[in-house]
Amino acid sequence: MADSFAHYPSLKDRTVLVTGGASGIGAEMVAQFAAQGSRTAFLDLDDANGRLVAERTGALFLHCDLRDVAALRAAVAEAASRLGRITVLANNAARDDRHGWETVEPDYWDERMHTNLRHQFFCSQAVAPMMQAEKRGSIVFFGSVSWMKSQGGMPAYTTAKAAVHGLARGLARDLGPAGIRCNVVVPGWIFTERQEQLWATPEAVAAALERQCLKEKLYPPDIARMVLWLAADDSRMVTAQTFVVDGGSL
């Protein structure tokens, strides 16, 4: 982590759980929480990359298909048994696969909800009793600028990501009396390896930068640093809010 960025004493020795931590934004969050001295665990399906991130950061990697709620609950319990009560959760896991509205079938729709929305609730449900026992906690949900920009070509994804905001605000009300904060981070176009490989044509990048107020590409550390602040006690009175990190494109 660059010396010019913040160090948060309140994150030292906190137990942090990141979903989808084997690549992209998730892997960057794992690295940055570990650098803060947090006891960090992450869940992912990608065993190869998961092991690499664990070796690089010292974080605990647990294989988990988050679409399987029983497996999710077991993984959360194992992370807590090995590292201590979880008081920070980053609900990062998602897939933005493109799909046409004409071809969507019920099974695919349901699978997209499980991949992009349902686990954010059930992970929160699993960690909330630990946070209640500790009388503090920060749950960071992940939204998307796609539905805010009326982006087409993936209706199940945009529906799931729009629903994240309602979930976070409702849980902020329910969990607030226990000192648990719930906020949403909305990344703009973040240039992960996946994005670079699939969609970052020169024309698309130029169009994105033209829309942004800040004429620079965004990268995973730009999101991770926002999540660190929301996890730390520096943001102790911030809840039920949405933070868009997109270089000013909306």
Image: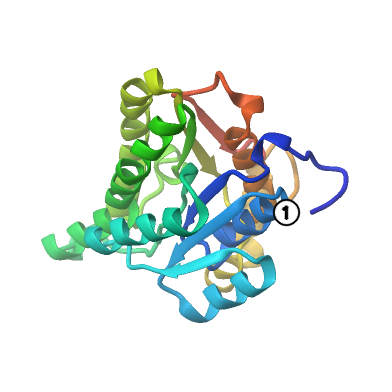
Q: Residue at x 44, y 63 (%)?
A: 43
Residue behind mark 1 = 35
Quarter of the image with the C terminus in it: top right
Q: Nearer the viewer, residue 152 or 176?
A: 176
Q: Name the outermost residue toward the bottom.
A: 48
Question: Which residue: 55% across, 32% down?
Answer: 243
At label 1, the amino acid type is Ala
- Spot occupied by residue 170 in the image (x, y as percentages of width and height): 31, 26
Q: Quadrant of residue 201?
A: bottom right
Kindly tell me whether residue 206 is visible in this rendering: no
Count the marks.
1
Task: Tell me if I can see residue 123 in this picture.
Answer: yes
Task: Determine whether, in the image, residue 15 is placed left or right of residue 46.
Answer: right
Q: Please report the residue visible at 75 percent of the width from the left and 45 percent of the height from the top.
A: 215
The image's colouring method is: rainbow
Residue sitting farthest toward the right: 3
